Image (cartoon, rainbow, N blue to C red):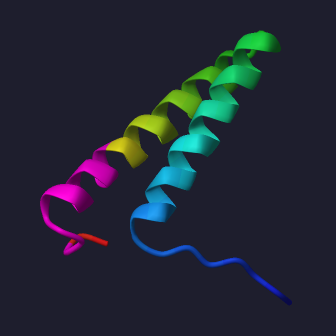
Amino acid sequence: MVGVFARGRITWMLGIALGVVLLVVGIFLPSTWLIVAGAVIAVFCAVFLILSYVTHGQTD
């Protein structure tokens, strides 16, 4: 099975993108679960992206 692996900061950026997509889908299809899940994923990934930049990649 072929898989796609992302490491480091690109992983957190892709996670933020996934969270935003879920958030937008949740807004257009009135779904509280998608809105909450998208927001939580986006914020979680944003925090770890900031940590990655602050620690110069030590937390990746």
**Horizontal and vertical percent for residue 43?**
40, 36
Residue at image point 74% right, 16% down: 31
Residue 44: image location, x then y, percent: 39, 43
Q: Is residue 6 left or right of residue 57?
A: right
Q: Position of residue 15 (x, y in %)?
A: 54, 51
**Screen quadrant of the N terminus:** bottom right
Vertical comparison of 24 with 6: above or below: above
Q: Which SS does the magenta portion mostly show?
A: helix
The front one of 25 and 7 is 7
Describe residue 57's horizontal placement relative to residue 54 as left or right: right
Residue 42 belongs to magenta span? no
Residue 53 shown in magenta: yes
Q: Quadrant of the C terminus?
A: bottom left
Point out the residue furthest to the right here. 1
- Quarter of the image for residue 28 reads top right
Q: Is residue 49 above or below residue 5?
A: above
Extent of the magenta region: 47-58
Residue at left offset 69%, top offset 22%: 24
Quarter residue 3 falls in: bottom right
Residue 16: % across, % down: 51, 43
Q: Is residue 37 left or right of residue 51?
A: right
Residue positioned 40% across, 71% down in the render: 8
